Image (cartoon, grey):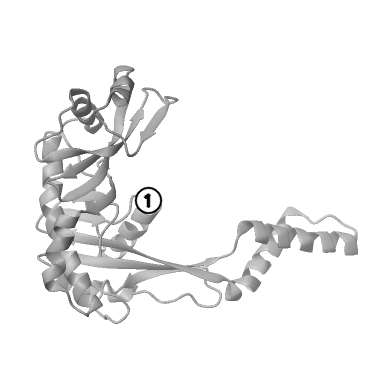
Amino acid sequence: MWFKNLTLFRFSEPFSPTPETLAEQLPPYAFQPCSSYQPLATGWAPPLGRKAVELVHTVASRSLVCLRTEEKLLPAGVLNQMVAERIAVIEDQQRRPVRRREKQDLRDQLVEELLPRALIRGRRNYAYLDTVGGWLVVDSANRHGVEAVTGLLRRTLGTLPITPPKVKQSVAAAMTAWLAEGRSPLDFAFGDSCELREPGEDGGVVRCRGQDLTGDEIRGHLAAGKQLTQLGLIWNGRIAFVLDEELVIRRLQFLDVIRESLDDSVTDSPEAVFDAQYALMSGELALLLPRLLELFGGEA
């Protein structure tokens, strides 16, 4: 299991629920599949998969949880068409216009009829709490996905004192300076993608992939006053990612030097493979995340 995007939070006050505490508090909010007339269901599921029963998986004080969601799909276009057809029948047969309230009642009735036959889309969102390092790490860069995880965690635990990490220097200004000087920070190398934005609300945006970031084209954009809002970086030849100005990490990749270290622990058990990958991934991130704060003058 490898996270692909990271939204990071720092605990804003002393907060260190033990794995045992989490294991006690999660079951009342465990996932239950959608019933016939339920459009959406969310809850905690075992991180190790359907054969597992534990809702928390902990390695070295880093506790992994998994939010499972089931959502019934009722395409808006199809629903609108069916409502329009029923409205047309009423208007033809009863020779009267259908008022707004009646249209809404027709829509609600159709939804109730269609829900038991609707297709179901499922997804899993992972996050882990690092109580030693003081991090909550969510495997998503999507605001709604992140809020789903943090919202249910807050309901489950009764409190969740978190805040996005704050640093002393402007992330965008620092990344722009690195690229303008053509020098990446110690133990980092430039990747091959970036996003540049002109100042102002209506400023143009340039997105580059598969490109030499120290080349003349990028320098031209910088000379024209554009500022970096995303920058591809490689840390110690081990982890590649794109860092944005809000310290959100996108397109996270654990490179071959890390993945090859799992070869000695090859096993036929998917659960054991998952456990080994999680232990390695979270251990590497425990080293990388504090280093990211250092790049921008440390934590504010």
Q: Residue at x 18, y 28 (%)?
A: 178
How many numbered marks have been drawn onto this rendered protein structure?
1
Q: Residue at x 14, y 47 (%)?
A: 237
Q: Quadrant of residue 227?
A: top left
Q: Residue at x 31, y 35 (%)?
A: 211
Is residue 118 shown above or below 210?
below
**Quadrant of the rendering where the C terminus is positioned:** top left
Q: Quadrant of residue 260?
A: bottom left
**Residue closest to the far top:** 224
Q: Which residue is denoted by mark 1 in the rendering? A: 142
- Report x, y in % for residue 249: 26, 46
Give amino acid for label 1: Asn
Q: Is residue 116 left or right of residue 283?
A: right
- Report x, y in % for residue 85: 78, 61
Q: Residue at x 14, y 66 (%)?
A: 262
Q: Is residue 47 left or right of residue 35?
A: left
**Quadrant of the rendering where the N terminus is positioned:** bottom left
- Mark 1 nearby-residue class (10 Å; few <14, some 14–19, many ≥20): few
The residue lying toward the viewer, choosing from 255 and 201, is 255
Is residue 67 shown above or below 193?
below
Q: Is residue 258 visible?
A: yes
- Report x, y in % for residue 142: 37, 50
The residue lying toward the viewer, choosing from 156 and 178, is 178
Is residue 87 shown above or below 122?
above
- Report x, y in % for residue 165: 20, 43
